[in-house]
Image: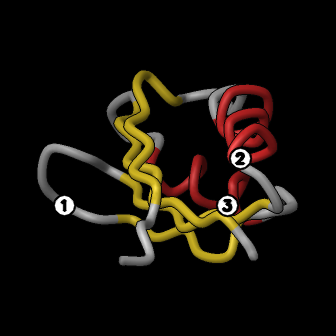
Amino acid sequence: MVVQAYVLIQTEVGKAATVVQAIRAIDGVTLAEDVTGPYDVIVRAEARTIDELGRLVVASIQGVPGITRTLTCPVLNL
């Protein structure tokens, strides 16, 4: 089974498009879109385990220049 999550991202002013382009190139990211509202970018990501998902967010996504804050929302299969 694959673990999936939405990652809500706030960026520096004017950096959303650059952040989306960089994030789309990361393995494990299935979708990255610019949005409006309190967050600037929304990402759908997947990994084999929750630990791998955590490493994907912390080591890869949060390392993209221009990101100021992330909120990870794991998908539940109820």
69 and 45: which is toward the camera: 45
46 or 30, which is in the foreground? 46
Q: Which residue is mark 2?
A: 53
Q: CA distance from mark 3 to mark 2?
A: 20 Å
Mark 3–mark 2 CB contact (< 8 Å): no
| Residue 64 percent location from the top left of the image | 69, 33
**Identity of the amino acid at label 2?**
Leu
Q: Residue furthest left?
A: 37
Residue 11 is left or right of residue 35, and the answer is: right
Comparing labels 1 and 2, the label whose residue is closer to the camera: 2
**Which residue is labeled 3 in the image?**
21
Q: Is residue 24 above or below residue 77?
A: above
Gap in angstroms between the C-alphas marked 1 and 2: 25 Å
Q: Is residue 60 left or right of residue 34?
A: right
- Marks 1/3: CA distance? 17 Å
Tag 1, which secondary structure?
Answer: loop
Label 3 or label 2, whichever comes before in sequence order:
3
Colour basis: secondary structure
What amino acid type is highlighted by mark number 1? Thr
Q: Amino acid at mark 3?
A: Gln
Q: Which image quarter: residue 52?
A: top right
**Of label 1 and label 3, which has the lower sequence position?**
3
Q: Residues within 10 Å of mark 3 (few under 14, many from 20)?
A: few
Q: Earlier in the sequence, mark 1 or mark 2?
A: 1
Q: Which residue is mark 1?
A: 36
Placement of the C terminus among the 4 image quadrants: bottom left
